[in-house]
Image (cartoon, coloured by chain):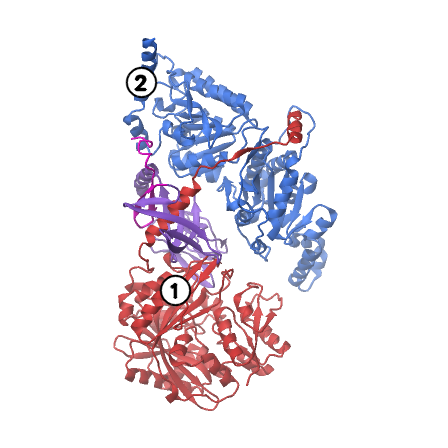
């Protein structure tokens, strides 16, 4: 008996010795925290339970081997702000965090458990990629992980946090999950690394330039969130989790708010400028309307002509989508359509109501957009809005023209509540375009075409491009006083709390891709 | 050595841009100790619209101008302080990264105020010296010549003559 | 006596004018523009008139025809243009005269003569007032400007003929900078004054800026109300003014006053006017220009003389004789004015915008606070950045500086960046305190342009730290409960 405990204690002792000063220092020198520290930051104190802590790396005959316990990944579960979450953290200190068979099996085990128990899963990634010396087994390991990512998609929230390298095929696990976080300066993601780029294309590029956090935040749109360092990245993950339900059956978590739902804000009346061509920051409107100005924006630097993010209104978690007049006048293009469509799909999967703030002059014109397939990509947004069965509410702030009007959750596309501010202009096209078509002959004949244009534009605005025709026809449910937007949205969300829609049965729809 | 070993005494470091780094130990969410002095703080939104920071029963009108993650712009008596709140680890990390970046830093010229670009004097890949005029921005009826504050190569010009810019929009990047 | 006045201006000066007019029993009218329909100045007038919707791109307060039409349509007797905008526009004075509206200011020909800086210099020269060298008349191109500059030697200053307020003005230190700066000045002048013509003048390095307040009625009476010193300037924008000037001896004051009065006589001046001089290191003074309007900094003169300058303007415009003579004018104590501008001093005085979320200002018998803003006011890029003026009056310069500092410490504006910390830095500046400062004070003599109160840095960090700590507090959320109706349907749809 004595002996049994001694062995038990010895193993524990060895594991603790693995986490010695040198272990921490190695990673700190890189400006990164260790896997162990990251796990402890994520979970509530003393709540983390580790699984398979002692799995050794597979025995291999080729290359370097190590006796490190855990095979370069810490996996387990615990509570995050009191809610059960599964997580794994790759350990760059062990074989560069490379993925071997045991490593893969540990991840797969908790993926399966997260799916069985309907709990969110967080992957903290810091890995050199597939372990070369284990050959095809490690590739098979990735395949197993990817398949489970897909199985769990839309069932439980999956979050990937890139806190070091993520290279090669390994990047596809994060890509299959719902959200990707990256840590600035010390993380990068690419399918083929700088060495390959050099060999194949003879191009010199640094890892940062190829796939650093800012590349993915601004250009590719791969990263949904970028934070300054490991600690704030993990705090960001916790903030995101606070908006998400555990799984697709549950409702998102409620939070008692001391921000009164009947807070009237007269500032809102001034937030849309009188000049229809003057830009403004729609974030100011969002922040004024939601609880305590708190808005967690997703992919803020990518496709900035559309804003997506989470907030609460009267405690209800809400997915917010808004055209951003400050960027490209808020016009829809390929990137913004895809960004918003993906966000809608997530909200719909996890029972999060969608509130859309609309100020859209139309789709961005041009050969670049047409040739790159704005038809295909715009259809994604249309499809996402039309398919979503969660409560869908639209507030038309200003412009709402043509195809973009239809796409942005219009009434007949399935909007549950469509509100408009008095500043709304809803029509087939803007005054200038409409007049050029309708009055071409008159304008050609006119002595002073500019004056006539102005006159007709004013008339058009007055008679057609306003919210009242839509209101009378029922395409707008109510033209509201901007100051009361918050209360109107809260009441709409409340009445829609019990909304259910049953879609026709099918295997799955054929989403445009 | 790891971040938990000292964690019982929770520390935060405020880095003030072109100022000092001040270390605080966090007693609770209101009480902080700096250089053995305890500061009890309370933030009050006043009825007249002002924000008051109460520190050890002294009332100081303050304003939080902006917050971006852990980076704050705070105004006290009308003076702006740019402060990043760091943990001991992120503090070390930042210093380390700054050292690395000093070798290969770049400067981003942002619009100081909303306005209209009247003229752009530089092109991409052009070499500039500190003080060279980059562009003319008209705001509040005044033409402001925006100059380079350091020498380098123009990496990117995101505006053209006639562009309307909002505050803090990136206009030119110098690498 | 005038019975009604249309105030063709906005902000603090509109309020300032309305206050005096009201005290005199005159009905006041303010103009509401679409750019700031809820501005504070509108509440100061007896009546508010909406500016008519026009397609015109001319800013409202520069639209002569519309403004005069408003006066006519509402039967308003007189127009007060304030400062800036149309205050020195001879066309408005002309238009008023033609339509029978009283223009509160000098006659059109005087405005025209003084408004064209080249003509003004000619007249002043003839009146025997010392002049700095320069191009005699406007220069039309870079070549001519270069020639003139080389003749008088660098540095030179390029000024807009129609200019004022520092617009269209550039200092040129080296010949190679001249083409760029010439074009900048000229295009800025075109935009600001609709007149691209500029002239070149010898640039006095680091002079003092001292101006004389004169006032003349239609009956030949001309007096002066002493000087103001406005040497605290940045890029020719005045920021702090004081009266009297610490640089003037009684003899020098008398000389400058005489020169100012002589100029006023030479042009048959009527109304309130200011003659601006530059004073060099050797206490020699040179004519700069004459402003034919009320100045922003007029309150410092009012404080030490006890004379209401707006009242004088109105009385003169009504045809009355000056109620005071030169012997009645006494300088009593010291007054300092700080301009509270919406500017980010730490970013090179860049104009700042925003909503005034709160304002607290000092009070006391020695304090005057002329403000155009209140809580809720919007500071937009449409207008000049000056929001308010703090004026402090004490027995001595030393006391005035001290009291100004205290008043600034009690003045708090939330929502927009202001020049308050800068003004404090000036009050704390040794050179300013000595009185021996000049226009180079800001750009060359001040090491820190903002004054930091004791412990300010630690207070700022405490705010950041406490906000951060609260923000990163553990948040507890509860799983949302599900209504059985929803749950059943949700499960069924799987």
Quadrant occupied by the C terminus of chain C:
top right
Instruction: Categorize mark 1 by other alpha carbons within 10 Å: few (<14), some (14-19), many (20+).
Output: some
At horizontal 26% and vertical 66% (from top left) the residue drawn is: C430
Chain letter of disc 2? A
Query: Relative to residue A132, is residue C26 depicted above or below?
Result: below
**Residue A313 shown left or right of residue A43 in the figure:** right
**Residue A255 shown left or right of residue B4 in the figure:** right
Chain A, hue in figure: blue
Where does the magenta region start and end?
B1-27
SS at badge 1: helix
Q: Position of residue C135 (x, y in %)?
A: 37, 75
Count the marks: how many? 2
Q: Nearer the viewer, mark 1 or mark 2?
A: 2
Residue position for label 1:
C181
Residue lying furthest right in this view? Answer: A473
Chain C, hue in figure: red
Q: Is residue C124 magenta?
A: no
Q: Position of residue C379 (x, y in %)?
A: 49, 61
Query: Relative to residue A452, is residue C258 depicted above or below?
Result: below
Residue lying furthest bottom in this view? Answer: C219
Measure the C-alpha gap from mark 1 to mark 2: 75 Å
Residue A185 seen anywhere in this rendered image of the structure: yes
């Amino acid at each position: 008996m004595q002996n049994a405990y001694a062995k038990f204690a010895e193993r524990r002792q060895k594991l603790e010795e693995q986490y010695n000063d040198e272990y921490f220092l190695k990673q700190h020198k890189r400006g990164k925290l260790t896997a162990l520290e990251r796990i402890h930051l994520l979970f509530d104190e003393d709540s983390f339970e580790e699984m398979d802590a002692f799995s050794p790396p597979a025995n291999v005959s080729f290359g370097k081997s190590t006796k490190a316990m855990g095979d370069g990944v810490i996996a387990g579960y615990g509570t995050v702000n009191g809610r059960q979450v599964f997580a794994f953290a790759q350990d760059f200190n062990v074989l560069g965090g490379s993925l071997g068979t045991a490593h893969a099996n540990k991840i797969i085990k908790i993926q399966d458990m997260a799916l069985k128990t309907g709990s969110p899963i967080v992957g903290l990634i810091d890995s050199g990629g597939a372990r070369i010396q284990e050959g095809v087994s490690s590739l098979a390991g990735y395949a197993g992980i990817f398949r489970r990512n897909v199985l769990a998609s839309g069932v439980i929230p999956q979050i990937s946090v890139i806190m070091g390298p993520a290279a090669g095929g390994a990047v596809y696990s994060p890509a299959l999950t719902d959200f990707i976080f990256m840590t600035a300066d010390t993380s990068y993601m690419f399918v083929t690394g700088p060495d390959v780029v050099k060999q194949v294309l003879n191009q010199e590029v640094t890892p940062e330039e190829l796939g650093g956090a800012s590349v993915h935040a601004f250009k590719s749109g791969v990263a949904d969130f970028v934070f300054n360092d490991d600690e704030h990245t993990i705090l960001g993950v916790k903030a995101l989790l606070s908006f998400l339900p555990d799984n697709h059956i549950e409702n998102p978590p409620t939070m008692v708010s001391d921000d009164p739902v009947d807070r009237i804000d007269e500032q809102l009346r001034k937030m849309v400028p009188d000049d229809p061509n003057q830009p403004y920051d729609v974030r100011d409107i969002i922040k004024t309307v939601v609880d305590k100005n708190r808005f967690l924006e997703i992919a803020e630097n990518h496709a900035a002509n559309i804003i997506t993010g989470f907030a609460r209104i009267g405690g209800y978690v809400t997915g917010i989508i808004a055209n951003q007049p400050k960027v490209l006048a808020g016009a829809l293009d390929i990137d913004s359509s895809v960004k918003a469509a993906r966000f809608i799909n997530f909200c719909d999967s996890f029972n999060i109501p969608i509130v859309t703030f609309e100020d859209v002059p139309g789709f961005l014109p041009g050969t670049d957009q047409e040739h790159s397939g704005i038809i295909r990509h715009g259809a994604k947004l249309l499809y996402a809005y039309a398919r979503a069965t969660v409560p869908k509410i639209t507030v038309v702030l200003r412009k709402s023209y043509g195809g973009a009007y239809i796409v942005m959750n219009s009434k007949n596309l399935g909007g549950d509540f469509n509100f408009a501010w008095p500043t709304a202009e809803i029509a087939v096209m803007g005054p200038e375009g409409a007049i050029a078509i309708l009055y071409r002959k008159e304008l050609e004949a006119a002595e002073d075409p500019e004056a006539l244009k102005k006159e007709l534009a004013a008339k058009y605005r007055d008679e057609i491009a306003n919210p009242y025709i839509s209101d009378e026809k029922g395409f707008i449910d109510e033209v509201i006083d901007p100051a009361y937007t918050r209360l109107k949205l809260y009441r709409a969300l409340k009445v829609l709390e019990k909304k259910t829609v049953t879609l026709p049965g099918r295997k799955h729809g054929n989403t445009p891709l | 050595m790891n971040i938990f070993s000292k964690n019982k005494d929770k520390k935060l470091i405020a880095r003030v841009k072109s100022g000092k780094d001040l270390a605080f130990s966090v007693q609770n969410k209101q009480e902080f100790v700096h250089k053995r002095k305890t500061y009890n703080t309370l933030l009050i939104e006043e009825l007249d619209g002002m924000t008051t920071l109460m520190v050890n029963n002294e009332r100081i009108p303050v304003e939080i101008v902006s917050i971006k993650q852990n980076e704050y712009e705070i105004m006290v008596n009308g003076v702006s302080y740019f402060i990043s709140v760091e943990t001991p680890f992120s503090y070390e990390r930042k210093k380390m990264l700054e050292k690395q970046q000093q070798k290969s830093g770049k400067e981003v010229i942002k619009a100081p105020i909303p306005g209209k670009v009247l003229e752009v004097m530089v092109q991409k890949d052009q070499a500039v010296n500190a003080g060279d005029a980059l562009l003319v921005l008209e705001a509040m009826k005044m033409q402001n010549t925006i100059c380079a504050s350091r020498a380098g190569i123009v990496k990117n010009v995101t505006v053209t003559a006639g562009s309307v810019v909002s505050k803090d929009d990136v206009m030119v990047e110098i690498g | 006596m005038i019975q009604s006045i249309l105030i063709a201006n906005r902000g603090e000066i509109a309020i300032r004018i309305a206050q005096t007019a009201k005290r005199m029993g005159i009905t006041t009218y303010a103009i509401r523009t679409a750019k700031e329909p809820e501005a504070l100045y509108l509440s100061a007038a007896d009546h508010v008139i909406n500016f008519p919707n026009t397609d015109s791109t001319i800013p409202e307060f520069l639209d002569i025809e519309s403004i005069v039409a408003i006066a006519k349509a509402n039967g308003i007797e007189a127009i007060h243009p304030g400062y800036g905008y149309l205050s020195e526009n001879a066309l408005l004075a002309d238009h008023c005269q033609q339509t029978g509206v009283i223009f509160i200011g000098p006659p059109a020909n005087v405005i025209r003569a003084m408004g064209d800086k080249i003509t003004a210099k000619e007249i002043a020269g003839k009146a025997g007032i010392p002049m700095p060298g320069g191009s005699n008349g406007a220069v039309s191109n870079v070549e001519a400007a270069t020639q003139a500059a080389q003749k008088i030697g660098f540095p030179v200053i390029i000024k807009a003929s129609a200019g004022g307020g520092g617009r269209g003005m550039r200092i040129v230190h080296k010949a190679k900078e001249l083409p760029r700066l010439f074009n900048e000045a000229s295009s800025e002048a075109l935009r600001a004054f609709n007149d691209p013509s500029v002239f070149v003048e010898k640039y006095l390095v680091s002079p003092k800026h001292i101006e004389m307040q004169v006032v003349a009625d239609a009956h030949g009476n001309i007096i002066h109300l002493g000087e103001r010193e406005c040497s605290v300037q940045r890029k020719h924008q005045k920021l702090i003014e004081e009266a009297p000037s610490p640089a003037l001896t009684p003899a020098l004051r008398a000389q400058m006053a005489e020169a100012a009065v002589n100029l006023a006589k030479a042009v048959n001046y009527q109304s309130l006017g200011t003659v601006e001089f530059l004073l060099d290191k050797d206490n020699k003074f040179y004519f700069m220009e004459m402003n034919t309007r009320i100045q922003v900094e007029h309150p410092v003169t009012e404080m030490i003389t006890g004379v209401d300058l707006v009242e004088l303007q109105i009385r003169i415009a009504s045809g009355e004789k000056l109620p005071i003579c030169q012997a009645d004018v006494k300088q009593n104590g010291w007054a300092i004015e700080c301009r509270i501008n919406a500017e980010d001093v730490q970013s090179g005085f860049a104009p700042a915008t925003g909503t005034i979320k709160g304002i607290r200002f000092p009070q006391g018998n020695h304090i005057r606070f002329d403000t155009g803003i209140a809580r809720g006011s919007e500071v937009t890029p449409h207008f000049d950045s000056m929001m308010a003026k703090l004026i402090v009056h004490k027995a001595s310069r030393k006391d005035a500086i001290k009291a100004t500092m205290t008043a600034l410490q009690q003045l708090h504006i939330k929502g927009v960046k202001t020049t308050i910390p800068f003004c404090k830095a000036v009050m704390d500046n040794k050179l300013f305190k000595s009185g021996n400062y000049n226009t180079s004070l800001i750009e060359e003599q001040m090491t820190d342009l903002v004054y930091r109160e004791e412990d300010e840095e630690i207070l700022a960090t405490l705010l950041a730290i406490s906000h951060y700590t609260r923000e990163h507090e553990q948040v507890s959320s509860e799983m949302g409960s599900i209504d059985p109706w929803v749950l059943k349907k949700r499960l069924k749809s799987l």
